Image: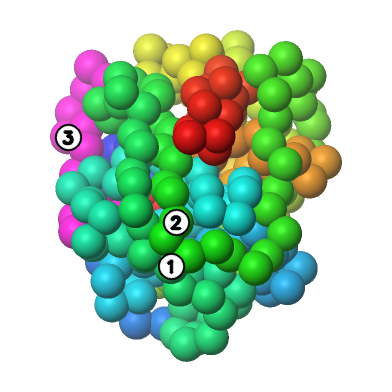
Amino acid sequence: MFGLTRARKAATVLAVGAAAAATALIGPAPAAVAAPQPIVGGSTTTTSAYPFMMQITDSGQNQFCGGTLVSPTKVVTAAHCMVGETTSTVRVVGGRTYRNGTNGTVSRVSKIWIHPSYTDATNGDDVAVLTLSTSMPYTPAPYVSSTQTGVYAAGTTARILGWGTTRSNGSSSNQLRTATVPIVSSSSCANSYGSDYIASDMVCAGYTSGGVDTCQGDSGGPLLVGGVLAGITSWGEGCAAAGHPGVYTRLTTFSSLVTAQVNS
Ligand code: ARG
């Protein structure tokens, strides 16, 4: 019954749960198109306002995921963004507000660390750390320590950012967008997603009525609480649908692993 969309690039159709092959088509991000709406619900912003916000691109600098700069040479993103990628195929672009821009700093990636247990976003462990060949001259974001689980208290306001589609099956946004969404309790998210929601590895955010959410192409980008990286855009059923909040990697669970990579 869920068509969980958690991929980007070519059409990824995923049916999970007991039920049928509901389909969620994720087209390749079309060329930059100014969107009528944000992320889904939200507003335009800039990488000057959020300097740690990185575009993850292919070798042609076509953005397909987001990432968060956590040190001058380390970027946190989603494991599912790195499936099939190599250090030859990925670039990280900082300081570029527009998908069709040519400004900012472009770096190659010298190492891709993917959580060793990662299999699929709905199985958790959706975290990766990229090591950059070129230092980014932008202020990194702090990220949660393993003990800061209070950031996930239900109702806490969280900020999402990305260049993703502005509705399910829509077009990517040319300009970076942002919105705020409330953290959803684990019990409520388990009601939405059943066994696909793994409370130890995931956290949900969104309004009960929907309307504001991350969507395709936002994956890998940040969920910030009080300016601190607390989650990674991971998956959801559709986008901004009532009763189906966005699902984010619960970064406190992976904080020590991320630190090991940041210090490596
Ligand atoms: N899987 C998407 C991506 O790769 C992110 C989906 C987030 N979905 C949601 N409803 N919040 O870009």
Asked which secondary structure carries label 2, the reply is: strand
Q: Compare marks 1 and 3 and give the one earlier in the sequence.
A: 3
Marks 3, 2: nearer the viewer: 2
Q: Picture coordinates of residue 178 (x, y %)?
A: 67, 61
Q: Quadrant of residue 90?
A: bottom left
Q: Is residue 254 above or below residue 163?
A: above
Q: Residues within 10 Å of mark 2 (few under 14, many from 20)?
A: many
Tell me where the magenta segment starts and ends, as one range.
Answer: 7-23
Q: Are marks 1 and 2 in contact (CB under 8 Å)?
A: yes
Other-residue count near label 3 (Cα within 10 Å), few / some / many at <14 / 14–19 / ≥20 = some
Inspect the image, locate mark 3, and give the three-letter code of the amino acid beneath it: Ala
Give the main secondary structure, helix, strand or loop, of the magenta stretch. loop
Vertical order, 100 against 50 (above or below)? below
First in sequence: mark 3 vs mark 2: 3
The amino acid pointed to by label 1 is Ser
Q: Nearer the viewer, mark 1 or mark 3?
A: 1
Q: Which residue is mark 1?
A: 107
Is residue 10 a member of the stretch shown in magenta? yes
**Quarter assignment of residue 89:** bottom left
Is 31 magenta? The answer is: no
Amino acid type, mark 2 = Leu
Q: Which residue is mark 2?
A: 132
Residue lying at 23% horizontally and 17% vertically, measured from the top left:
18
Q: Point out residue 205 in the picture as x, y percentages from the top left corner.
A: 63, 35
List the residue tagged with mark 3.
21
